[in-house]
Image (cartoon, helix red, strand yellow):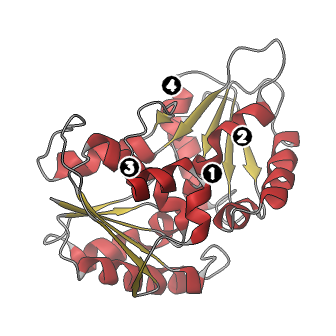
Amino acid sequence: MKIALMDAGIGLLAAAAAVRRLRPDADLVLSSDPDGMPWGPGSSQEVTARALTVAEAAAAHRPDVLIVACNTASVHALPALRARLEPDLPVIGTVPAVRPAAVSGGPIAVWATPATTGSPYQRGLIEEFAADVSVTEVPCPGLADAVEHADEVAIGRAVAAAAERTPDEARAVVLGCTHYELIAERIRAAVQRPGRPPLALYGTADAVAAQALRRIGQQPTPATPDEGSLTVILSGREEELPPAAWVYDEGRLLQAGRRGRDRLPLSSGGRP
């Protein structure tokens, strides 16, 4: 079994680690585009073109399923990716977990890139699934890029600024960019208010990993002793994980083959 994941950068690590925890025996193909980072400021046509290139680099390795572990690519390029690759290669998109966060009750905050915040796509999710819940959209300029480069100072500044824009009464935060899941506990610590109930974080990594397995008729088998291979493609070149990936638990898990069962899982959302 071979599962491919794609993203502009290392945001795919969260979903890849979730797949590894569910199926340690799966061969993983991680295809990203560091030469084209960031995708967010580009036009829909530019994002689609880059996403297709990254997806085709992954598809060349003949995976059983492709996870689009990127909110920006899912927003702009998912129809084109499915038109190009399906039905031969099933494509799983990523959607901010607005629906499960709203079901759990509000108020909620949705942290996302400036390009996604206020977009018709995100507003549509909120109108469809959270019309009766207080929702605050929180743009997080620079945060994804800071996470991509493991810039601790920039991460701290961006998280603090977003936390200031998050209402004190927020009971949950939706992580609307896959990069944010790599620093989930830092976000929780920044937003958690003294005397308030524990803050819930809603990511997508666990949900898309489980959906990918279902799509190809596989079941989670976390106790298998087998360890699948790891192939890393950076802007079309087969290389090792970039140094920044090693800063995060998910990157170390993938490289070292650790199971990571002690990590606190996020609440999960669905897919388009």
Residue carrying label 4:
103
Q: Where is residue 180 in the image (x, y as percent from the top left)?
A: 63, 51
Q: How far apart are marks 1 and 3 (CA)?
A: 17 Å
Kind of residue indicated by mark 1? Tyr
Q: Residue at x 61, y 79 (%)?
A: 37
Residue carrying label 3:
271
**Contact flag, marks 2 and 1 (Cβ < 8 Å):** yes
Q: How many labels does the image show?
A: 4
Q: How far apart are marks 1 and 4 (CA)?
A: 22 Å
For discs 2 and 3, the disc positioned in front in the rendered view:
2
Give whichever of discs 1 and 4 has the lower sequence position: 4
User: Does any portion of residue 216 appear in the rendered image?
Assistant: yes
Q: Residue at x 35, y 77 (%)?
A: 55
Residue carrying label 1:
180
Q: Where is residue 213 in the image (x, y as percent from the top left)?
A: 21, 48
Kind of residue indicated by mark 4? Val
Near mark 1 (Cα within 10 A), the count class, few <14, some 14-19 or many ≥20, is: many
Q: Quarter-wise, where is residue 64 in the image? A: bottom left
Kind of residue indicated by mark 2? Ile
Question: Dot 3 lies on which element?
Answer: loop
Give whichever of discs 1 and 3 has the lower sequence position: 1
For discs 2 and 4, the disc positioned in front in the rendered view:
2
Question: Dot 1 lies on which element?
Answer: helix
Q: Distance between the residues labelled 2 and 3?
A: 23 Å
Looking at the rendered structure, which numbered label has been put on residue 89? none
Look at the picture and state if 260 lies above or below 44.
above
Kind of residue indicated by mark 3? Arg
For discs 1 and 3, the disc positioned in front in the rendered view:
1
Residue carrying label 2:
187
